Amino acid sequence: MSIISLTDVDFTRNGNQILKHINWQVDKNEHWAILGLNGSGKSSLLKLIMAENWKTSGEITVLGTRFGHDQIPELRAKIGIVGSFIAERFRPSIMAENLVLTGRYNSSMLYREFSEADLDVARDLMVQIGADKLIGRIYGTLSQGEKQLLLIARSLMTNPDILILDEATNGLDLFAKERLLEKLHQITQLKNGPTLLYITHHPDEITADFQKILLLRQGEIVDSGETQKILTTETLSSFYQMPVDVEIVNGKYFAIPK
Ligand SMILES: Nc1ncnc2c1ncn2[C@@H]1O[C@H](COP(=O)(O)OP(=O)(O)OP(=O)(O)O)[C@@H](O)[C@H]1O
């Protein structure tokens, strides 16, 4: 059963047709990676799913919510998001566990009263994902990798059905990146865990956890399907319109420009 369905979706802003004729179905527990060059429309596509952007035409249904017919705020609570456009919304002075707690309210600040017990829930989540050392720390003083870990904890506050990661490894060193991918692997092993949508520029980050790939170029889906079928020299060279060699090293895919 599809948890995300886009049918003939177009998205235009300021006279710029950003997404064209998008048809895409995502089934539950089918984790997808989305590849595309800069400006191909990846973030715009994810913002459509989160109802941060509004489609110009076409049909979108996410987790049973039909856009234009059903209530959107309840849907937003079911989608977790990790990405720079979220990271930028927080005050540098916010405490780590307070930031994690904002995930419950889908906000960047804690506008409502909250108790120590609420903060304990956030702290428990931090412990679960291995961010216990960050309890009591101030967001603005954290490293890039620590911030990402915190955003992952925040995104899990509402037990989301969908977890979107938009270039989540940006700024991470080699090993922090591996740790993040390992965290994602653990999330894929959770019973009733979220479906992952993972935007990246780097095929080597598309681990075996991602069964499907969507290729986006200039606002259009060029190809989609099983990871092994998509991550090939032939398919990626045709997608990038530049010759690349795909090599597999220790189970990781690398696309090397020729
Ligand atoms: N509000 C807007 N008005 C006009 N153009 C926009 C608007 N928002 C996005 N765009 C344009 O739409 C295109 C797609 O942007 P988007 O951020 O979705 O790309 P992306 O694939 O996520 O890129 P990157 O990999 O660089 O993050 C870009 O050319 C961008 O300039």
Image (cartoon, grey):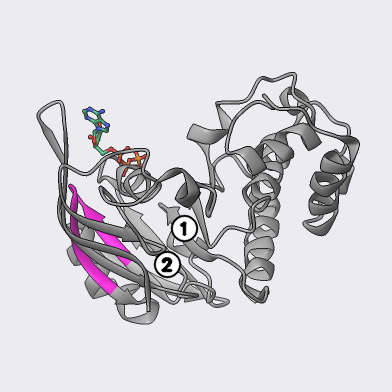
Q: Tell me if 147 is positioned left or right of 89 in this view.
A: right
Q: Position of residue 51 (x, y in %)?
A: 36, 43
Residue 32: give its label. 2
Could you say which quadrant of the image residue 93 lies in? top right
Instruction: Give left or right: position of 202 versus 96.
Output: left
Looking at the rendered structure, the kind of residue marked 1 is Tyr
Question: Which image quarter: residue 98?
Answer: top right
Q: Residue sitting at 46 percent across and 43 percent down?
A: 73
Q: Quadrant of the N terminus?
A: bottom left
Q: Quadrant of residue 150?
A: top right
Most common secondary structure along the magenta stretch: strand
Image quarter hosting the C terminus: bottom left
- The local crowd at label 1, few if under 14, some if 14 to 19, many if 20 or more residues have their Cα within 10 Å, is many
Magenta highlight on residue 120: no
Kindly identify the amino acid type of the residue bearing the numbered disc 2.
Trp
Residue ID for mark 1: 198
Q: Are marks 1 and 2 in contact (CB under 8 Å)?
A: yes
In this rendering, the answer to whether 140 lies above or below 61 is: above
Query: How far, Cα to Cα, is label 1 from label 2?
Result: 6 Å
Q: Position of residue 30 (x, y in %)?
A: 45, 75
In the depicted view, which residue is nearer to us: 120 or 18? 120
Query: Which residues fall within the magenta stretch?
Result: 214-224
Q: State whether residue 87 is above or below residue 224.
A: above
